[in-house]
Image (cartoon, helix red, strand yellow):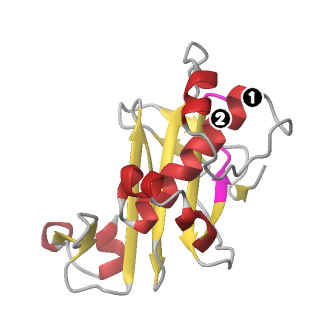
Amino acid sequence: MLAGYTGERPAEVELVRSLRGKPQLAGQPRLRFSLAHCDGLAVAAVATDRAVGVDIERVDHDFPHDKVESWLGSMPRFVPSGTIEPRQAFYANWVATEAICKADGGGLAAYLERGGEAAGRHRVQWLDMGREFIAAVATEGPKPVHLQWPQSTPRLDGGAISADKGVAQEP
């Protein structure tokens, strides 16, 4: 996928790590990317001249989201309480937080140590993945980005998930 952006053959794409440990393309300082996967489904985001992060999670109906929610304390919430079902809101907030951490390059521990201040420097957009998965992409700065993906998203296990729309949706 990245070779399509660099013009190189896939075997020639070289990855290095930033000072914070985030993977980046060698010799391509303007091109930024992020990858995430969960239960055989992968999502990717690519941007030019701005940080980008993406995350995806399967909505687990047995996960004690209310206990983790209280652990997060006063961290920024991207989906206000009461706007959607609490479990969906938890996962929407979680993937938004993870996407920002990936865009920022410092990871979750650094994000929590700084009280979530990176949230104010990023715009979050959610991807329509149906009810089984939830995904978000975070980009540096307030300007929205155009997001697109194939109508049928290939799974790593050979299956596919069909998307109703090929655009990002914000809750």
| Along the viewing direction, whichever of 53 and 114 lies nearer the viewer | 114
Q: Which residues are magenta?
A: 125-132
Give residue 82's position: percent from left, percent from top: 85, 35
Give left or right: position of 91 versus 15.
Answer: right
Which residue is painted at 37% across and 50% down in the image?
Answer: 109
**Is residue 33 highlighted in magenta?**
no
| Along the viewing direction, whichever of 146 and 83 lies nearer the viewer | 83
Question: Mark 1 near mark 2, Cβ–Cβ under 8 Å?
Answer: yes
Instruction: Return the mark for residue 86.
Output: 1
Give left or right: position of 48 versus 123.
Answer: left
Dot 2: within a 10 Å radius of its alpha carbon, few (fewer than 14), some, or many (20 or more) residues?
Answer: many
Mark 2 belongs to which amino acid?
Answer: Phe
Give residue 40's position: percent from left, percent from top: 39, 33
| Along the viewing direction, whichever of 68 and 126 lies nearer the viewer | 68
Which residue is painted at 62% across and 65% down in the image?
Answer: 147
In the rendered image of this protein, does residue 96 appear above or below residue 140? above
Which residue is painted at 28% across and 85% down in the image?
Answer: 28
Residue position marked by numbered label 2 in the rendering: 90
